[in-house]
Image: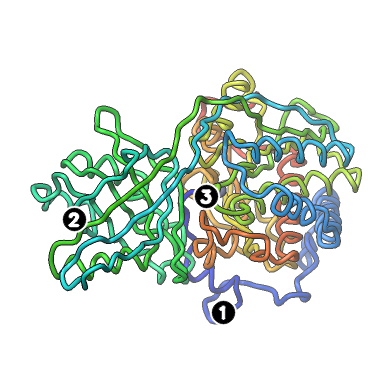
Amino acid sequence: MKNSSIRFAAFLSALGLTTSLGFAQAPPGRAAAPGAAAPGAASDPAADALAATLARIRDAAMKDDWAYQRLADLCDKIGPRLSGSAGAEAAVAQVTAALRDAGLSVTLQPTQVPHWVRGEELADIIDYPGRPAGIIQHMHLTTLGGSVATPPAGLTAEVLVVHSFDELKARADQARGKIVVYDVPYNEELAVNGHAGTAYGQGVQYRFAGASAAARVGGVAALVRTVGGADYRLPHTGAMGYQDGVAKIPTAALSAEDAMWLTRLAAQGTVKVHLKLSPQTLPDVESHNVIADWPGREKPDEVVIVSGHLDSWDLAQGAIDDGAGVSSAMGAIEVLKSLGLHARRTVRFVAWMDEEHGGSGSKAYFKANAASLNLHAAAIESDEGAGRPLGISAHVLPESLQDLKPLITALQPLGATVLEHSDVGTGADVDPLDEAGIPTLSPLVDTRKYFDYHHSPADTLDKIRPDDIKAQVAVLAMMAYYLAERTQLLPRLTVSTQLH
Ligand SMILES: [Zn+2]
């Protein structure tokens, strides 16, 4: 997922944690009928018909467990789906078959993806002040995606523990020949207050850029405290990147507990670590985005994308990241199909390949559609987990938010009441479209626990409530249908891709 945050008060209000903040929320089951005209207002037959259709979609989605079954298939029968792996290819085949079985026509869009494989990973603390003779202690770590290996026998060095890039800069003269350890805590207060994306963003810069920053000052390896919330000594993996022109040094994430331990030991004197990582970067391989169109009845060339990403990290089942999003997006198109509802424009499901390790699927889609961006009305991506849907987030012109009010009204019975204006694109895979001016949207979900499991060995199916998947399918299907059905399109974010 990418960084995002939602307003604190609106977040609490949507969760029903407070009733005194002035945010309107109908109690579950007591919402006004979507589209019901205010007393005395003139009724609008077209708006009423659209509201009734949205209610039908919502009710059908809440009774349908097809998407949850697809998620269970992805998680339990395939599991990890890192780009370039056999699991990723099995997922392409499984999703294609499921969509075809549901009566949808599928296209596979080729994309070249990286193929990085984890190897052995070991980190021992071999010396520290007060070490009893013969004691060597093991840490829990996971190599970061894209990291180079240590020498085959491993490397042994003193550690330099820092808590920020600024501290590394200030202590640059102490870094030469050392293993640089970034002990930067995940801000759990931000997360419980509804700003999990912001907390993640603060930590993830060290995971992504920590190795090159350490190498620039002579470091020989970088160990980064896990970016996540739970305290079960789990290391969380994720992508890292090397800066051009800087030596490539090996890098891994430590569990939060092990990073804190190194901080305590290093405060007492010299600490030495033996580190061995043996990942490999193999040649790129061909993989695919999976695309299924549910054709529009009047303007089939114009599309609204509803999507999630199919690849996942290699440590677990990729249930919340992003099995939930991709399965819910599949569910959205399946619900429209099962109701026989063709909107004015085409609703296009996309299962993106390689969000986690470079976004090559998203780039390939953009390239293949460079000449038809003007036919893209909007793009929706779900990549913030399977928490309860609280509303929607939209990167649209601020004045366009009011155009989404009928949609939010229709979502109210689900408890999804927040309409958030996002200042940035709403998903990593739809960002290229967003940058070209196409409005992007996503379901706004409860992310308070998302980073407890994200990219860790604990991202498994049991973390997900089937009813939350049904609700997410409802939100996605209603968003996609609404945007594809409206006569008026949402205005472009820039003028460059104005729809004719
Ligand atoms: Zn994701």
First in sequence: mark 3 vs mark 2: 3
- According to the picture, the residue beneath numbered tag 2 turns out to be 160
241 up-or-down from 339: above or below: above
Cβ of mark 2 under 8 A from ligand 1 = no
Task: Decide: is 244 above or below 383.
Answer: above
Q: Is mark 3 within 8 Å of ligand 1?
A: yes
Q: Which mark is residue 1?
A: 3
Location of the C terminus (image quadrant): top right
Please tell me which residue lies in front, 80 or 230.
80
Is the residue 25 above or below the residue 342 in the image? below
Q: Nearer the viewer, residue 193 or 181?
A: 181
User: Can residue 378 be seen?
Assistant: no
Alpha-carbon span between mark 3 and mark 1: 25 Å
Image quadrant assignment for residue 360: top right
**Residue furthest left as drawn:** 173
Q: Amino acid at mark 2?
A: Leu
Residue appearing at x 47%, y 54% in the figure: 4
* Residue with the mark numbered 1: 17
278 lies left or right of 417? left
Q: Residue at x 23, y 56 (%)?
A: 164
Residue 357, x across and y down, in percent: 50, 38
* Quadrant assignment, res 133: bottom left
Q: Earlier in the sequence, mark 3 or mark 1?
A: 3
Q: How many marks?
A: 3
Query: Could you tell me if residue 63 is visible in this image?
Result: yes
